[in-house]
Image (cartoon, rainbow, N blue to C red):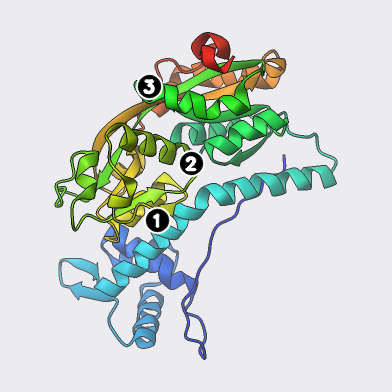
Amino acid sequence: MTQVSIRPVWTIQDPDGAPLPARLIELLVLVAETGSLLHAARALGMSYRRAWDLVRLGEQHFRTPLLVMARGKGSTLTDLGARIVWADKRIHARLRPSLETLSSELAEELRGALSEAPSALRIQASHGFAVERLIERLAQDGLKLSFSYASSSAAAAALREGACDIAGFHIPIGPMEAMAVAHYRPWLQGLDLTLVDIATRRQGLMVRPGNPKEVFALADLVRDGVRFINRQPGSGTRLLLEGLLKSQDIAPTRIAGFEQGEYTHAAVAAYVASGMADVGFGLEPPARHFKLDFVPIATERYFLLCRDAVMATPALQTVLAALRDPVFRVALEALPGYDPAAAGTALPLRELYPALA
């Protein structure tokens, strides 16, 4: 089965000079993770001397240190070194879903040229950590998928237009449910669809360790000196936040940074962790990954909407088997803020959300 993998590579250079080796950035990232230039060099399969040569090359380029060495205390990044590492983290956090989507599209094209069988299922989904793990599990099970990460609205539109067999997106549980259902109704009404649960998950405020700006509620976002980073317009998370603000009579224009949006939850978390904002709104796993504090605000249901015509196919049965597998549920339970208790439950959409019938 043809598979494609794409990873971002970036370099730094002056207009009239050669670029710094990409390995220098990889080295600095590993120094930040291990606290040791020696351990970082070993992880990259290079000698300690070669690692030092790379560091010196970078320091000559910037005319300032990148590392501070202390006997018995390992290696510490300078402010510049740390900024380079955070830039790398933001790049990967922002691009990963897009590159995975492009990889799937390219693999599908290559399979056609190689006369391989087409994908058994076409999936478009709002990016999330449970659906990401599901796609990884299905690939391990040998199921050929054509998948694309998109906003919840785009996934619903693709389902309406026949561009996919399954759409993955999320609807809040509680007061914001009616607002979200009304938003998606134009795309989903009249379709014969089955809802397959994956998990419930928590959305909330990502704040720096210790919550120095004391942001404990949405009302705190309007305070002077609080810098916010949002998700992009059209995303389900942005829709949820705007609904919550409206319900509390909080004008988005009063929030500094509200119109600045990132395309993934991880990118929002990296933005806050790097010190470029004080608070963001999104899922709990990336907040914990970047060692941020998290203030839960809302719970939502993430699920798959499947065309009834594919429910009896072997491919869809493989999806249900994966979701119902106790081992897979343990993997979902390990995600902070996720509850997969209903994973694999399949019911007609009209029974769960009559307004979408």
- Which residue has dot 2 on it? 235
Using the image, determine if residue 239 lies above or below residue 196. Answer: below
Amino acid under label 3? Ile
Please rate how many residues cluster around mark 2, counting C-alpha atoms within 10 Å: few if below 14, some from 14 to 19, many from 20: many
Please rate how many residues cluster around mark 3, counting C-alpha atoms within 10 Å: few if below 14, some from 14 to 19, many from 20: some
Give how far across and how far down residue 25 sits, in percent.
42, 69
Residue ranking furthest to the top: 351
> What kind of element bears circle 3?
loop
Q: Residue at the location (66% across, 34% down)? A: 158
The earlier-in-sequence mark between 3 and 1 is 3
Q: Residue at the location (68% across, 27% down)? A: 165
Taking 233 as reference, is 56 left or right?
left
Q: Residue at the location (42% across, 41% down)? A: 238
- Which residue has dot 1 on it? 260
Question: If the image is split into quadrants, where does the C terminus sit?
Answer: top right
Amino acid under label 1? Gln
> What kind of element bears circle 1?
loop
Find residue 173 and name its label.
3
Q: CA distance from mark 2 to mark 3?
A: 17 Å
